[in-house]
Image (tube, rainbow, N blue to C red):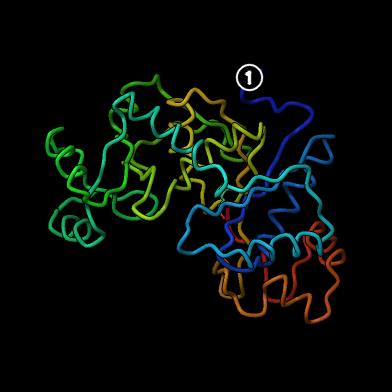
Amino acid sequence: MSQIESPRHLVTRFAPSPTGRLHIGHGWSALQAHDLARESGGRFLLRIEDTDITRCREDYTQGIYEDLHWLGLSWDGLMIQSARLPAYDAALEALKAQGLAYPCFCTRGDIAREVAASLHAPHGADGPLYPGTCRRLGGDERAQRIAAGQTHSWRLDMGAALARTSPLVWHDATAGAVPVDPDALGDLILKGKDRPASYHLAVVVDDAAQGVTDVVRGLDVFASTHAHRTLQALLGLPSPFYRHHRLVVDAQAKRLAKRAAGLSLAELRAAGWSGPDLADDLRAGRFPVGIALGED
Ligand code: GLU
């Protein structure tokens, strides 16, 4: 099957991180993923993306279940990322075995200083790209520092990775065929100092493990797909079809933050809203006062 044609029975997922309560934007995203799957006779899956152990909380995970049920949504499968660390380690090992992952000992301060000292620090989608300091370390120094117990993350050597693959493209419902841009994220983190797997690594491994055919998610992570497509190629995983959607924004046209006061689904419920009615409104494109869909 070609990557462009979606199969008839679509498998979609909603993949929130339990770092706060869900807001209307999350509800809208979940509804789209849910309805797309159900209308095709396919499956809608839920994935709790809780590898950021310093920020994720179990009560927020419980809140996700509550909020989705309140909207009237059910799911056909549940995956919890914190229970899947061996799968991410295996993927990291596969990248190391290809010589495409390297340990990075830099602190945030080290990186900021190096970027500030550089006249032409390249910028990607999320700000300045990692300047590659630790990519240039020799094998002996790496081994010595690791043996000495120096804390480190693991990064992808994006240049080497793309030199290894044929030109890569991913497919988006709105943007069409998108060639991979190596500078979108640069040498992204695969495993953090206190994060057992990065969002990028875990999402790629799990979309494949769950058989996701269509990734429905916000435009805020559009640029991440360059990294995801690259990792799929390196790990021999299929590439789903992407459906990045516009974000829900507030009256100042700013995207909703997890802490957006008064706009969490829990607060709306407490204020007496009906979940199924809100779901129907969102499906019809009717957003509560002060809320709208943002730009493409
Ligand atoms: N956990 C990510 C988020 O909450 C999911 C993004 C995605 O759907 O890939 O932004």
Residue 152: where, in percent of width, then height? 27, 49
Residue 37: where, in percent of width, then height? 78, 40
Tag 1, which secondary structure? Answer: loop
Q: Which residue is mark 1?
A: 2
> Which residue ends up furthest to the bottom in the rendered image?
271
- From the viewer's perspective, is residue 75 above or below residue 262? above
Q: Residue at x 67, y 79 (%)?
A: 262
Q: Is residue 183 left or right of residue 149?
A: right
Numbered disc total: 1
Q: Quadrant of residue 243?
A: top right
Q: Quadrant of residue 154?
A: top left
- From the viewer's perspective, is residue 239 above or below residue 110? above
* Crowding near the residue tagged with mark 1, few <14, some 14–19, many ≥20 C-alpha atoms within 10 Å: few
Q: Residue at x 76, y 53 (%)?
A: 31
- From the viewer's perspective, is residue 39 above or below residue 26? above
Q: Residue at x 49, y 22 (%)?
A: 236
Amino acid type, residue under disc 1 in the picture? Ser
- Disc 1 beta carbon < 8 A from ligand 1? no
Residue 203: where, in percent of width, then height? 53, 42
The N terminus appears in which quarter of the rendering? top right
Q: Quadrant of residue 84?
A: top right
Q: Residue at x 75, y 76 (%)?
A: 268
- From the viewer's perspective, is residue 52 above or below residue 184? below
Residue 11: where, in percent of width, then height? 72, 35
Q: Is residue 256 left or right of residue 78?
A: left
